Image (spheres, rainbow, N blue to C red):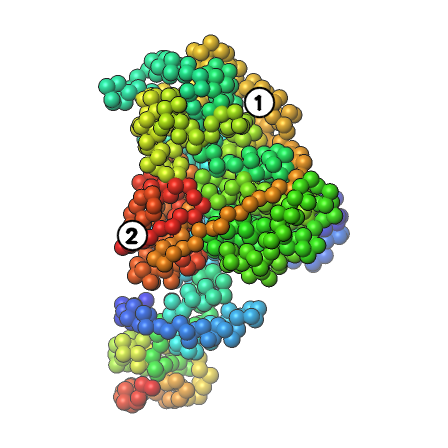
Amino acid sequence: MVNLTIDDKQVTAPKNATIYDAAKMNGISIPILCHDKKLKPFGACRMCLVEVEQMKGRQIPACTTPATEGMIIRTATPDIIKARKMVLELLLLNHPLDCPVCDKSGDCDLQNLTYEYKVNSNRFTDEKFNHEIDYNNPLIERDMNRCVLCGKCARICDEIVSFGALTFIDRGIETKIGCEFEDGLNCEFCGSCISVCPVGSLLARPFKHKARFWAMTKHKSVCGYCATGCNLTLGVKDNKVLTTIYDEDQGFHKGQLCVRGRFGYQFINSAKRLTKPLVRKNGVLTESTWDEALEVVAVRLKGGTAVGALATPRLTNEELSLFKQLLVEKVGTSNFDHSAGYAHAALTKGLVSSFGTAASSATILDIQKSDFLLVLKSDTYETHPVVGFEINMAVKNKDVKLTIISDKRGKLSKLPDAKTTVHRPGSELHLINAIAKALIDENLIDESARTISGFAELTAALSGLTAEAVTEYTGVSSSEIKKIASEYATASKALIIFPVGQAYTGHTAALASALANLSILTGKNGKEGAGVLCLSEKNNSQGAVDAGFYSQGNGLDALQILDGCTSGSIKTLFIAGENPLVSYPNRTKVKAALDAVEFLVVSELFMTDTAAMADVVLPVCSFAEKEGTFTSSDRRVQYIKPAIRKIGQCKTDYEVFSLLLSKLGGTAPVTAAAQFDVLASKTPGYEKLSFAVLRKDGAYAPVSIKPVLVVTKAEKPIAAEPGNLLLVTGSALYHSGTLSQYGEGPMHVCPEGYIEFSRTDAASLKIVENDLVTVTSESGSLQLKVKVSLRIPVGVVFAPYHFAASSINTIWNGAPVTKVSVTK
Amino acid sequence: MSDVAAQNNTEQEPEIDLSIADAVIDKYIDIPGNLMPVLQGVQDEYGYIPRVVADHVAERLNVYPSQIYGVLTFYAQFHLKPRGRFIIRVCVGTACHVQGAPRIVESFFDKLHIGHAETTPDLRFTFEKVACLGACGMAPLAMVNDSTYGGMTVQKVEEIVADYSQRPMK
């Protein structure tokens, strides 16, 4: 700590604080334009000038100058005020004063400072800039005429997002912010640059001229896409969510969002939302009343075990637990599941057998506290972009070592000193087992591991699986495997991160256990910055598992339920928000099941392919219209409350389930809060949680693990034959599940499915970017657009799974790797 | 970018052989802070920095393409358009200005049909106005590559253009 005097006030500050930080911590505000607490000090704008007595009254920037012992600082002398006024005058010299039509007005740092310093005239005159405005993309407008060259956009794009789309171009008075060769912006459109822009140079185009900043009410919420659990502030006017507002103090991620969080909100007020219940009459879905629709459903639910249910893990914890209560207590069935079943097996089977609990042993906050990150698939960045930002910051700012094991390269591979081990598709488990074997052989294990149950069995099972032996399957050299093992073992804090989800069929229970084995063998669990972090797919995937909304041995799992529909053992199927026709493997099979089932009820926001097949469609609410809790991947339980009134006649899923429960002779707790209390009392780790506790920042549900070493058997991966390519599926950065198809933002940037080829394969097939090719597998064929990239290894193709229009499950039956042939 | 130069660019770029750039990059790849020497090296090889080369350097050195463009536009030494075989520089510093440099500039414009910092379509000449060449005693002054021409007149402009139009391109 250092002691200093700011404006005649004795204050103390941490040793590494700047003058600006020291003042802020002690309630003294110094104006800033180019400084952002998330970014490295830059010192470009000269707004934060202060006087330091020891520096002979010179004016120095507070944001870049470290606070030192005994400093005597004055932040608002007449000279300082005069200097700041002049800085503003000079900035306003070129800045167009088009505030009345600028969307930033009201939230503009330059406007606020001009007001604060009463700069009502300008002693200087100069021409305004006449730069062309970048309208090349639908999401971010770049108007360099308004720019004050604070560099925050370029810095955040480099330091946090690691994309580097923007930079300073040219020199002197002609300096501007732009992209390479004056191109239009073509990036991942996370909008971080918009969030930090102090003026109206970077604006969200979907929000252009929609509302004045001050006319909106701001509602804190939690993002409804992936399981990172980012916090959002929704800007609402006239019952419409118009934008997301940046709040640099919100959440662990300090307001950082990805393209889905920032630009994917339009589905909430989409004109395509269902607003009235629909009942199939004479073969046609006809508008109906809630009474009629629910009556029909209630009658059909009295079918005991002939009833099956699939729910999306986008529902709240309260809804999922109430749905479970309805099914178990009143319907009398245990046939319910979510996310195709296998998508959560890594948690519910893998980590349960290894850790004794269906949860990760680390949190997202551990990423920056770690020394070594072992990331499986660089897709972590695509499935959970904000976790990707955490990895970027850990590697760039904290010198955390990063090793990626993947079947293709990705953005994470480009981080400084990142090591990427590219293995043959489908051979992850061999590779991880070989690492475990290397840990044991090279005696890199922690002594505690020898006493953990399963050690002898694991050692015996791994006996033949040396690094040399698996090279044949993995294509990775034995020295590389041994190097990963020793780096992982010798790092004092090492964290394993891997994504799971519907597109990641290869990330099975066995793989989760194999990864857990590595952490158990080396004693990495239970420490800060170490452990295993399983990133589940949907915003409440972890919550669905915690609420027990999956088959636990006494009922059918998702794929078995669909088989039951086909065979006739399931007569009524209740699908709450899932879209199996698009997201589950093998479309033909799913279609047959949904055709065969006697009665299908779907509660949905949109008329999805699945809903269109239903006998009753119930219109339900989005996350912005309901109260409840979501649990993120790392078991952070967060509270949401309605930001807008319900759309049309929509009801929340909670209301739907309560009404059905009462129709079947039961009673539901009246409020979501009471339902949460019921859930919390039954769920390990949730005992101390309640809405009152969660309302402000949410809370972590603690995880206690009982490690067991589990033997996992790897099957021989599929090898390509001549003329075949190996298809791996996954997520595209801009999307999440099938819901993001209704977000304008993600759809503008990535409107359709595609198939990604390596340059070599593209050249030998004589195809180029944007060609249409027919991809044929055993289960069917599909036309897809071609993308050519550097990141795909030869012989492998990649396709994302989100799109109904080019449903990848026509050619993919759920295998981790599918053999396909491609014709033009 | 003038239309002529833009045309030149699109006509030229498909023929660019990246192995030349690779040779330069290989020389510096393991040295920290290698961006400037690599860019200077590739400019020496190609005469300017074509976009495909800039993108290739970005890919090989794992630097953002935008960052490379920032460096290329910051330093006057880098050129993004093909340059002529003969670089004509006319001094427009104070001494030369007083001695009639503007008229020298005008007559080069007339003769070559190009403006400041532009290149003739046949890639023979690039014309540049420069602030001072440091030989004010010889004002008005012009340079063609490394040869200096003092006491410039409109007559001499014609002679210089005629002379260099005859010289071989290689």
Q: Which class describes the residues within 10 Å of circle 1: few (<14), some (14-19), or many (20+)?
A: many
Q: Which class describes the residues within 10 Å of circle 2: few (<14), some (14-19), or many (20+)?
A: some
Whether callout 1 and callout 2 share a subunit is answered yes
Task: Say what secondary structure mark 2 lies in.
Answer: strand
Q: Quote the CA–CA distance across marks 1 and 2.
A: 50 Å
A481 relative to A167 in the view: left or right: right
Q: Residue at x 40, y 45 (%)?
A: A800
Camera-side mark, 1 or 2: 2
Q: Nearer the viewer, residue A121 or A573?
A: A573
Residue A240 rendering spot, x and y as whole percentages: 39, 30
Residue A162 rendering spot, x and y as whole percentages: 51, 54
- In the rendered image, the vertical position of residue A353 relative to residue B12, given as above or below: above
- In the rendered image, the vertical position of residue A688 relative to residue A245, given as above or below: above
- In the rendered image, the vertical position of residue A816 relative to residue A210, given as above or below: below
Q: Residue at x 42, y 38 (%)?
A: A737
- Kind of residue indicated by mark 2: Val
Residue A475 rendering spot, x and y as whole percentages: 50, 59
Q: Nearer the viewer, residue A165 or A713?
A: A713
Give the image quarter of residue A339: top left
Q: Nearer the viewer, residue A56 or A691?
A: A691
B72 relative to B107 in the view: left or right: right
Look at the image and tell me whether residue A565 can be seen: yes
Residue carrying label 1: A679
Look at the image and tell me whether residue A312 can be seen: no
Q: Are marks 1 and 2 in contact (CB under 8 Å)?
A: no
Residue A566 rendering spot, x and y as whole percentages: 36, 28
Q: Nearer the viewer, residue A797 or A461?
A: A461
Residue carrying label 2: A773
